[in-house]
Amino acid sequence: MAPNVTAMGKASIDINGFQKWATGNLVDNRNRGIFAEWMVGEALGCIKPKAFRVEWDSFDLLYGDLKVEVKASGLSQTWNLHKATVPKFTITGQKWTWLTEEEAEALPDQDPDAQYRRSGVWIENDPPSRPADVYVFCLHEALPATNENVKDTDTWVFWVVATRTLDEVVGGQKTLGLKKLDSLAPRIPWNEIRAAVDDCQSV
């Protein structure tokens, strides 16, 4: 039997090849953002060994009982690698929040805002709200960005801001620039993320 053919006569699939093809370009904004989520999850130690990322969760990570939203940007973009751009982070409140089936069980049976689905429920937020408890903002500073330096935590800088602080200071603002971000929290390295998130819980 040929090495790449299964007993059913079909060519076997190399999952590593798929992952490289789909997400191998870490300079791409989407992939860099997903990498930032994983990187923050590793800093917090909250990614379980067999866990997978869920695309449409209302927040990115769960650290104990704390819901964490990760926002990423970079000075270098794929369309202009060598010239620094002006980073902006999206902080728009969500009009709809997705709850799992387990979370939905705690809701009133006749909740008028609930949009029930087989695996969970959508809840309407009026006005739109930020469902996470804390935000971790991640900025990749290397110019130009490469796959190698994106993977290096020393080329990143981070800010940790409690959602209640965002709500109080910027309200319904949809984006956040570096100047305002620097006024809300200090810049920290990757290995200080967990302590900063813990501080948000204790305030």
Image (cartoon, helix red, strand yellow):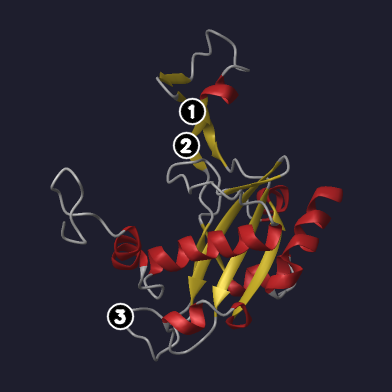
Give the mark nearest the N terminus, 3 or 1: 3
Corner quadrant of residue 21? bottom left
161 and 199: which is toward the camera: 199
Against 115, is 67 above or below? below
Q: Is residue 203 visible?
A: no
The amino acid pointed to by label 3 is Trp
Label 1 crowd bin: few (<14), some (14–19), many (20+), radius 10 Å: some
The numbered disc on residue 49 is none
Label 3 crowd bin: few (<14), some (14–19), many (20+), radius 10 Å: few
The numbered disc on residue 124 is 1
Q: Position of residue 71 (x, y in %)?
A: 54, 61
Label 1's element? strand
The residue drawn where x is 51% and y is 55% is: 174
Q: Nearer the viewer, mark 3 or mark 2?
A: 3
Mark pair 3, 2: CA separation: 31 Å
**Residue at which label 3 appears:** 79
Mark pair 3, 1: CA separation: 37 Å
Corner quadrant of residue 2? bottom left
- Report the side of 82 relative to 21 (left or right): right
